[in-house]
Amino acid sequence: MSGSGGMMSVPELLQQMALWNWLNCEDEDSKQLLKAVTGVRVAHSLYRRLTQQDTIDLYKVMRKAVRLKGNGRMGTGRV
């Protein structure tokens, strides 16, 4: 679980709900829903790895932190 405080992220929760539904019903619709949700999660993870989006997001946060540190009087509305 990657959320804070032991909470699942939204994609994790959706996948677990689809899995739970499939385990309880074991019908074809439930199986297709589970396959779709899992496929979207895999595709999203691959996209983020290939584009290095996590690294880009980290650099954006670091750049904002440097700006704030350099100008302590700067309000958050100007970041």
Image (cartoon, rainbow, N blue to C red):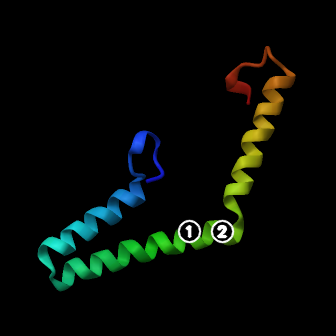
Q: Residue 35 at what x, y percent from top left?
A: 34, 80
User: Farthest residue toward the top?
Assistant: 73
User: Farthest residue toward the bottom?
Assistant: 28
- The residue sitting at 74% across, 54% down in the picture is 56
Circle 2: element type: helix
Q: In the image, is residue 10 above or below residue 62? A: below
Q: Which mark is residue 45?
A: 1
Res. 62 image quadrant: top right
Q: Residue 26 at what x, y percent from top left?
A: 15, 80
Q: Which residue is mark 2?
A: 49
Q: Residue 18 at what x, y percent from top left?
A: 27, 68
**Mark 2: amino acid:** Arg
Q: In the image, is residue 10 above or below residue 23? A: above
Left or right, 42 with reference to 8: right
Circle 2 packing at 10 Å, graded few (<14), some (14-19), many (20+), is few
Q: Nearer the viewer, residue 65 or 20?
A: 20
